Image: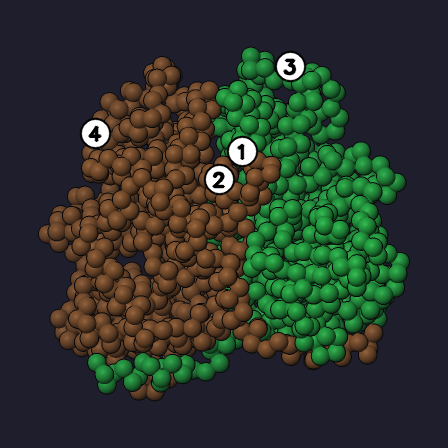
Chain colours: A brown, B green
Amino acid sequence: MNPDILNERQKATFDIEKLTNILNGGPEKTKRRREIESMVLNDPDFKEQDPNFLSRSERYDQAVRKSAQMILKLREYGIADPEEIYCYKSCVHPGRPEPLDLHLGMFLPTLLNQATPEQMDRFFMPAWNLEIIGTYAQTEMGHGTHLRGLETTATYDPTSEEFVLNSPTVSSIKWWPGGLGKTSNHAIVLAQLYTQGSCHGLHAFIVPIRDMNTHVPLPGIVVGDIGPKFGFSEVDNGFLKLDHVRIPRDNMLMKYAKVDPDGTYFKPPSDKLTYGTMVFIRSMIVGESARALAKSSTIAIRYSVVRHQSEIRPGEPEPQILDYQTQQYKLFPVLAMAYAFTFVGHYMNQTYHRITGDIHQGDFSELPELHALSAGLKAFTTWAANSAIEVCRMSCGGHGYSRSSALPDIYVDFTPTCTYEGENTVMMLQTARYLMKSYRQARAGQQLHGIVSYLNEAEHQRIQPQLIAAKSTGIDFNDLSSLVELYKLRAAILVELAAKSIQKELQHKKSQEDAWNNSAIDLVRASDAHCHYVVVKLFADKLGEIDAAPLHSVLLTLARLYALHGMSNNSGDFLQAGLLEGSQVIEVTSHIKELLSELRPNAVALVDAFDFHDRMLNSILGRYDGNVYENLFEWARRSPLNSTEVHESYHKYLKPLRSKL
Amino acid sequence: MNPDILNERQKATFDIEKLTNILNGGPEKTKRRREIESMVLNDPDFKEQDPNFLSRSERYDQAVRKSAQMILKLREYGIADPEEIYCYKSCVHPGRPEPLDLHLGMFLPTLLNQATPEQMDRFFMPAWNLEIIGTYAQTEMGHGTHLRGLETTATYDPTSEEFVLNSPTVSSIKWWPGGLGKTSNHAIVLAQLYTQGSCHGLHAFIVPIRDMNTHVPLPGIVVGDIGPKFGFSEVDNGFLKLDHVRIPRDNMLMKYAKVDPDGTYFKPPSDKLTYGTMVFIRSMIVGESARALAKSSTIAIRYSVVRHQSEIRPGEPEPQILDYQTQQYKLFPVLAMAYAFTFVGHYMNQTYHRITGDIHQGDFSELPELHALSAGLKAFTTWAANSAIEVCRMSCGGHGYSRSSALPDIYVDFTPTCTYEGENTVMMLQTARYLMKSYRQARAGQQLHGIVSYLNEAEHQRIQPQLIAAKSTGIDFNDLSSLVELYKLRAAILVELAAKSIQKELQHKKSQEDAWNNSAIDLVRASDAHCHYVVVKLFADKLGEIDAAPLHSVLLTLARLYALHGMSNNSGDFLQAGLLEGSQVIEVTSHIKELLSELRPNAVALVDAFDFHDRMLNSILGRYDGNVYENLFEWARRSPLNSTEVHESYHKYLKPLRSKL
């Protein structure tokens, strides 16, 4: 063990294990997670070569091998709970997406949710036993987030009782689905349903795409890998071009919508049926943001206590770089954010499960707010995490740039969350639509409930500038609830500003649609402020649940840092609204500096609490034992370019050059 | 040609070729650049396979092949001007660093600058003829920016008249130098010089590392590649461990510092000798920032006029995504920044060349300010460009994530600029040190000259809050010089705040060093504001040189957007200082919206003016003809994973699974 990192651990003021339990959702969950981890990590069948040293094809090959093993072992150990499967999978492919992700995470669940009993009989068990390997083919080359724009057609032919699936344009080629390129022999294809001369919008169809025995693409199917990407190197994201491919009528998923043999169409009972799944997936993504931040801050903070550099006081030994204020200012807000987003993820997951019962009984009353909030929070957390990962990487100097740090991989595998499951700007505008509607309702005298209740008229009285100005002088920056209040007022004011921008455009004779587009900058800002308020509020709420004094104290420090750092970064909003005065911004900075010093002795303990096994981090800079440099050298020597002392290019190109010059 | 992009080009209000000439520094430069480009691009010897489809070793191999060809052709065509060599190289390896970069860019120039005539005879021609292939080995595993911390030793042994080069610790292993791993047979090694029992600091030594015939590492040398990185896949960044390696005394570069045969040391005449080179390299990096932004904005803006998505007005065709205000708000500020940084790069380069003559005559008077400014501008521009590249990538939706967009590669090859040649935070603090010194001088009544003259006492009178408050109501946001003035005042105020923070710490009995460290956040902010002011000012100065009215008009729009966007993003600073009032921040947003609309018709013309050949961009989304989708499909089909219809992993792992489940 590196003596510096050992010394750090001795300085912790709280019980790390207790904090780990809070992060995991209870001691039993911590225990079970560790059981699953050791099951996988001790299993020789899951041994792997460092993917950094493999070609793309070898990485895919290794991932398929491990995924196949995983399916066998899950069956062998009887692991069937979705959360446990997810945990097991995360250990088999540490932090990396894999070729069967969509089979397990989309194909099987979609069958469960949308297949008729007859379809379950035909497809589910073969899929469960991996005879059928499926994916979910929604996104096309020309359209992603805007689903109505998808162009693939499914035209019903009553004479043969078949659907004809077709890709009418180049841009309609299915593009991006994971596992589509090489792995799957079936796809659930989302297509515009045409029957009896009318289009009825998007519906889901089960389409066989490869021969069940030879795995060769079926007639009318052009399928393949979309080529190398920034990350996701283990995944065969694919394309699928359908040339009038015929499937039987009963390959349309018909639990809700139906097409009769004669072609008569019956629409599904509710259009909110898919909201629940979207909320669930977005709450998962918020959790992914938290996990990416936790990993990145673990790596950067551990390395920052091992690395000594330069000097603060002349003549003294080189200090640990975590003793530089600028380094603390980079990393501790990321650490605070990791905790904040973890708690937001918990909240969304719990809320989703709480109202799932209501949804199944046809009560959708709480869903619209949660749906709107989940869109914004997905965007807010992924954008913030995306930048923060890079802050962590660059805080490690040159070595952060080496693949051995794991930080480049964390970034490239995380960054698609800003785009998939709804492009972030579009998501922010979705939340804004809800906020604008709520604002109008409140102005019309309706009493709002839930998180947007701050838009109620009575609340609104409190945010008149003159009141604020009086108020701002009395802010207690040590009091978290005061900070929550400031974030709430900021959100209320930015929602109002966006609403007024729309009104102003309308007064200039703009159409509703142009007024919306010409206010889009303000709308995104309003959503951002709304989400920021929710995050600060949920962090504060969480503190109410923590009893142990030392733990409460360190988490309060993190929560205050999260809130004050956000105020400093967005000081323009608070000043503009009269919520702060100029001199108070300087006070905010002073408080931040104090909080950085307070956190310093607990920094390593706070990342240790995330409890990442070294093999899950796969980072030399982030090693638990802190023995960075010797392992960096050892890793480099194993690199494929060092398998020979002299690269063949020397003899081929460089040496022959001499005679020519 | 895609009709949308054709239509965009017809809307341009200015002469693109004239703007290209301004960007290139004159029509002759444009002409010569195009000549060199077509020389390379039409040369069958430089044909290459898409590196995205190659393994690391194949990429290195291809790069060495092309670099060897390049050396031959440069000789054949008699291209010897450094700027033209750089241009030629940039075409041979479009946008990609390559294995001979350090041989050409560091090894040869260091010989020219620091070798004695005798050393020139021994080393220069062999290196020119690529018998000697060299690199510049400065950075170690444990130290980069902090040069005094480097641990490699060169101990003089007068008995044999040799230096003994040694890596005393793991962290002292040379790490990162480009071309060191596999390509070079010599290295200029920076080491702490010990002679007659004293250490004299860092000096440069020529160390043979591989056998001139077999290329096998010499005794005492452990050398190799440091393993895969985020980018730089063509470059064999290497490690070098020296075990008491002996070199003759006259392998120390002795043009300035000297060691006599008996071991007597003579120090160099000036410690500012290396400043000039640093300024030059940093001005090159500012140019790289501009180029990365120009490429990224070209790709994103062209794609944004080809891509149609969603709807603004119901029932109408899907609009070009560049018609969304949010998309303009993402991309046009990046475009403005590309222009701003191009002009900053020109300024630095010109200033460097202007004072080079002075330097050679021993007049270093202007160098300190330029040196301090170049540190900050290097950090300011690379950080800004780094984030902006990712904004461009994510503005392209999912396809930005594909390697075919080129945006991932632009990012990974650019992002090291934030770390190398001086880590950015350290660079900002270097500039801050100059600002603090200037501030103290001004307070002491000295009259400052140059860019920091705004810190003079007389200027200072103007920034008293009460004066500002009166002033701020009369700001003309259409007047660029008013905006420059605001940036200047902001810089003055933030410099003062940082100085006051240090004073406060000192009053609390902190040492100078701790006071500095405890004010580091404020110091970085002050430097940032200083650099931001310089950039806005140089953009405004550049406009003074533009005659043609249509060109002046569009560049003024860009300059105003650059300035106002920065004010909006940093509104907290301007409000806190009383330079703006709350209502004026809303005004700033309105002006920004107007500028976005103004720029919209010229957007494609403004990126066309960067004049990137399609083969230099190597981006399917950024194609000049706009034919994106069909080419994306064609590219994907060529991907190696599609060389067989069925990947072998199906037969190895997936099919056998069936019998086991």
Q: Chain of mark 3?
A: B
Q: Residues within 10 Å of mark 4 (few under 14, many from 20)?
A: few
- Residue B247 as seen in the image, left or right of residue A143: right
Report the disc number at residue B517. 1
Residue A590 numbered mark, or none: none
Residue that carries the numbered disc 4 in the rendered image: A446
At mark 2, the secondary structure is: helix
Identify the image quadrant of residue A29: bottom left
Name the secondary structure under disc 1: helix
Q: Are marks 1 and 3 in contact (CB under 8 Å)?
A: no
Q: Name which residue lies at 21% across and 29% down.
A: A446
Q: Element under label 4? A: loop
Mark 4–mark 3 distance (CA, rounded to whole Å) = 54 Å
Q: Is residue B56 left or right of residue B283?
A: left
Image coordinates of residue A609 in percent, x first then y, are: 31, 49
Closest to the observer, A549 or B324: A549
Q: Amino acid at mark 2?
A: Asp
Q: Are marks 1 and 2 on the same chain?
A: no
Q: Residue at x 42, y 30 (%)?
A: A594
Q: Quadrant of residue A244?
A: bottom left
Task: Find out whether the residues at labels 1 and 2 contact each other: C-beta distance under 8 Å.
Answer: yes
Are discs 4 and 2 less than 8 Å apart at CB? no
Pinpoint the chain carrying mark 4: A
SS at badge 3? helix
Q: Which residue is mark 3?
A: B461
Label 3 crowd bin: few (<14), some (14–19), many (20+), radius 10 Å: few
Decide: few, some or many residues near mark 2? Use Cα within 10 Å; few <14, some 14-19, many ≥20. Answer: some
Dot 2 corresponds to which residue? A323
Measured in 3D between alpha carbons, the distance from the residue under mark 2 to the one under mark 3, in whole angstroms, is 37 Å
Are labels 4 and 2 assigned to the same chain? yes
Q: CA distance from mark 4 to mark 2?
A: 53 Å
